[in-house]
Image (cartoon, grey):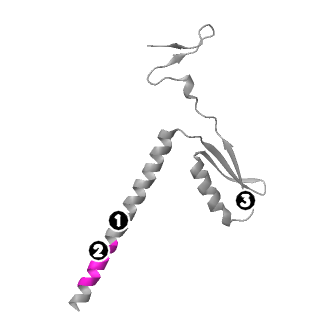
Amino acid sequence: MKGFSAAGQFGKTLGYITWGLNGALKLVGTLGRKTYDLLANRDKYDVEITTQGYTIKSKEDMTASEVQRMMESMGSFGEIELHVTRRESYDKSNTTRGKSKKLSPDKPDTEDS
């Protein structure tokens, strides 16, 4: 009987270790994806979920991969429409890192120190 008890404890311990590692890997994956999305400065989208003309839910500031996951998950539902609109993108050409720019009518780009 002691052999079964020890094997049961070992199996339980191994299960908890596997469960903990799985959670840690999911956390690292989620954080890595969100960090990449933040640093990549990719296009963002607004999504509106409607059925029969009524808005069920609105989500803003989603990446293309999040929109794709949402569309894949909506395949099992009935008559649901997704209205996806692209957000106005951030214009990198109008800013400089660490410095602010003043735009004046007579001088198009002047930098403040």
Question: In the displayed image of the protein, which residue is found farthest to the bottom?
Answer: 1
Instruction: Give the image quarter of residue 18.
Output: bottom left
- Secondary structure of the residue carrying tag 3 is loop
Question: Against 104, is 6 above or below?
Answer: below
Tell me the element at label 1. Answer: helix
Give the main secondary structure of the magenta stretch: helix
Q: Is residue 12 a member of the stretch shown in magenta?
A: yes
Q: Earlier in the sequence, mark 3 or mark 1?
A: 1
Q: Residues within 10 Å of mark 3 (few under 14, many from 20)?
A: some
Residue in view at x 23 percent, y 83 percent: 6
105 in relation to 19, above or below:
above
Image x and y of residue 13, in percent: 29, 74
Q: Quadrant of residue 25?
A: bottom left
Asked if residue 75 lies left or right of residue 14, the reply is right
Find disc 3 in the rendering and name its residue.
80
Q: Considering depth in this image, is 52 or 100 the residue closer to the camera?
A: 100
Q: Amino acid at mark 3?
A: Ile
Give the labeled residue for mark 2.
Answer: 13
Q: Earlier in the sequence, mark 2 or mark 3?
A: 2
Q: Quadrant of the C terminus?
A: top left
Residue occupying the point 78% across, 57% down: 52
Disc with the residue nearer the chain's start (2 vs 1):
2
**Cβ atoms under marks 2 and 3 closer than 8 Å:** no
| Magenta stretch encompasses residue 89 | no
Quarter of the picture containing the N terminus is bottom left
Work out how far the residue at label 3 is from the one at label 1, CA to CA, in angstroms: 37 Å
Residue type highlighted by circle 2: Thr
First to last magenta residue range: 6-15
Number of the label disc, if any, that sits on residue 20 = 1
> At label 1, which amino acid type do we have?
Gly
Q: CA distance from mark 2 to mark 1?
A: 11 Å
